[in-house]
Image: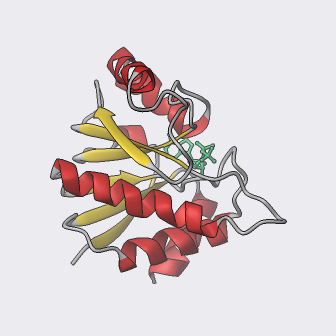
Amino acid sequence: MTTITLVQGDITRESVDAVVNAANSSLLGGGGVDGAIHRRGGPAILDECRTLRASHYGKGLPTGQAVATTAGDLDARWVIHTVGPVWSASEDRSQLLASCYRESLRVADELGARTVAFPAVSTGIYGWPIDDGARIAVETVRAADTAVEEVRFVLFDERAYEAFAKRVG
Ligand code: ADP
């Protein structure tokens, strides 16, 4: 049984087995939570991302998939990078967003991670409405078949925290 916990704050300050990054498909860094993770985690993360680009992910990491690297200087063993979909009003990309959570947990299971911190994937620069992003995140984690014991959603602002709190109940 996976326990869901909620924290308002900066995910780079969390102490967990794995921190999930809302990356972009280049894996080479970006803004938002991605930038914060690379800043605080240091260059070892980017080094491994570059190696991934040079080997398995020559074209980048596809949307909805997840891959792990070292967590560098973060208080975690791994960073699991996942690429959320950009919000679209004309196309339903919910399955891709759900896939980010499912695939990240699958990678966490492969690693043996028992505590995993997630940001609200796609709800920043990628524009996903926070209430719907929270619904998909919580529903997908609840439905997942995983050995992860704690999923900690780390929400940057109060609005995001409230959206998740409403779903977790
Ligand atoms: P995306 O491109 O997937 O939308 P963002 O990083 O822009 O990714 O935003 C995803 C979510 O992460 C947003 O809700 C944003 O407010 C939040 N966020 C940004 N920085 C941090 C951080 N340091 N810790 C936790 N959440 C963060």
Looking at the image, the residue that sits furthest to the left is 112
Left or right: where does residue 73 sit relative to residue 141? left
Residue 7 appears in the rendering: no
Q: Residue 144 at what x, y percent from top left?
A: 34, 74
Quadrant location of the N terminus?
Answer: bottom left
Going 25% across and 44% down the picture, which residue do you hit? Answer: 15
User: From the viewer's perspective, is residue 58 above or below residue 105?
Assistant: above
Looking at the image, the residue that sits furthest to the right is 90
Left or right: where does residue 169 sit relative to residue 16? right
User: From the viewer's perspective, is residue 66 above or below residue 133?
Assistant: above
Going 46% across and 50% down the picture, which residue do you hit? Answer: 65
Left or right: where does residue 158 sit relative to residue 71? right
Q: Residue 39 at what x, y percent from top left?
A: 46, 22
Q: How is the image coloured?
A: secondary structure
Residue 30 appears in the rendering: yes
Please give the count of numbered marks on the rendered protein. Answer: 0
Q: Nearer the viewer, residue 36 or 23?
A: 23
Going 62% across and 31% down the picture, which residue do you hit? Answer: 31
Q: Residue 169 at what x, y percent from top left?
A: 45, 84
Q: Residue 59 at what x, y percent from top left?
A: 55, 31
